Structure formats: structure tokens, C-alpha cells
Amino acid sequence: MKFSTREDIAAPVAEVFAAVSDFESFERAALRRGAEVSRTDRLGAPGPGMAWDCAFTFRGKGRRLSAELQQYDAPESMIVLWSSSGLVGTLALDLVQLSPRQTRMMLQLELKPRTIPARLFVQSLRLAKASLTKRFKRGVRRFARDLDGRLSDARHRV
């Protein structure tokens, strides 16, 4: 099952990539929402091989997720592979410079079931795909608008 969307951001591609690859800020955001996040690699700089283990509650049940940065091509793209109980997937981010001050962000999330319970879960998601796609797009739009605002504020402060 795939979800994909794209959003335009009024900022240079290098600034957008720097913001979306600020992994420490995403770790802090997950911690604020009650998840436990720990880095499992020893890399000093962002790049392929960065990895995380996460524990969180979803639908009233404790879940674990492992993620690894598979591809990191600054300032254009990155791919994160992840796995959880019975599910594996990819999160692919591509950035395209539309102009010196305009960037298109394209995001694709793919879920693949690996067990019978996971297949049932994904099947239930398929029944609600239209509403889940709207929620996914709304979340990415909100993230892009927030990012747009933060980058705009940072440029005006300089």
C-alpha cells in the first residue's frame, strides 16, 4: 500500500534539505509525543547507515519500530527503510528545485505486510484508503507550511 503527495515550499532546496534532515529535531518531537527513540548507529554525521529503534503506543498497544537511513543524497533525496511487527516499508523523500527560492517536496510512504495479522491490518487500511490518503496529505501539507514558516522566519532574522 502506497501513499504519496507533494508540496511546494518557498525556500531554496539546500535549506529545505537541511531542515528535513535535522534528525535530532524529529527525535525530540517523537519524545515529546511519548515515544522512546534511541539511535543505534555510531555515525557522527548524517548519512546512510543511521539507524533508530522506537517504542510507542498505537491503538492502545505498545509497538516497536526500527528504521535505517538507506540513501542520503544531499540536497535531493533520502530513503528510510523501516520495520515493525509484521510490517516493513519505505519512506522516500525527493526535493526538486523549481527556482532559486522554490522547492517541491515529494514524499512517498509504502507499507508491506509480512505476516497474516499484518495483512489483515493492511487490508483494513485499504478499506479506508481515501480517508487515510487525505490525512496523509493534510499532515504533509501542515509539515510543509510549518517548515515554510520556520525557514522564512530564519531568513528574515539574518
Image (tube, rainbow, N blue to C red):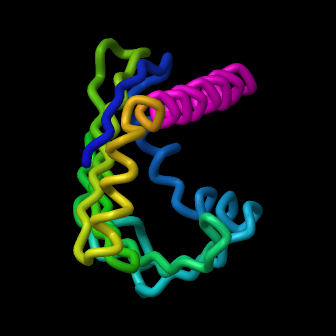
Q: Quadrant of residue 102?
A: top left
Residue 70 in percent (x, y) is at 24, 66
Q: Nearer the viewer, residue 19 or 34?
A: 34
Left or right for 56, reference 44: right
State the extent of the magenta-drawn residues as a range.
134-158
| The magenta stretch spans residue 39 | no
Q: Quadrant of residue 35?
A: bottom right
Q: Is residue 112 above or below residue 8?
A: below
Q: Could you tell me what secondary structure mostly forms the magenta stretch?
A: helix
Picture coordinates of residue 86, whole percent (x, y): 32, 77
Q: Position of residue 92 (x, y in %)?
A: 28, 48
| Residue 116 percent location from the top left of the image | 26, 75
Magenta-drawn stretch contains 156: yes
Looking at the picture, does residue 69 appear above or below residue 62?
above
Residue at the (27%, 52%) spot, across then down = 110
Residue ID at (32%, 39%): 3
Q: Quadrant of the C terminus?
A: top right
At 66% across and 24% down in the image, what residue appears?
149
Q: Left or right of 59: which side holds 78?
A: left
Residue toward you, 117 or 145: 117
Q: Residue at x 34, y 74 (%)?
A: 117
- Residue 68 seen in the current view: no
Q: Is residue 132 left or right of residue 97?
A: right
Question: Does residue 106 lie above or below 35 as drawn?
Answer: above
Residue 2 shown left or right of residue 139 in the figure: left
State the image quarter where residue 44 is shown: bottom left
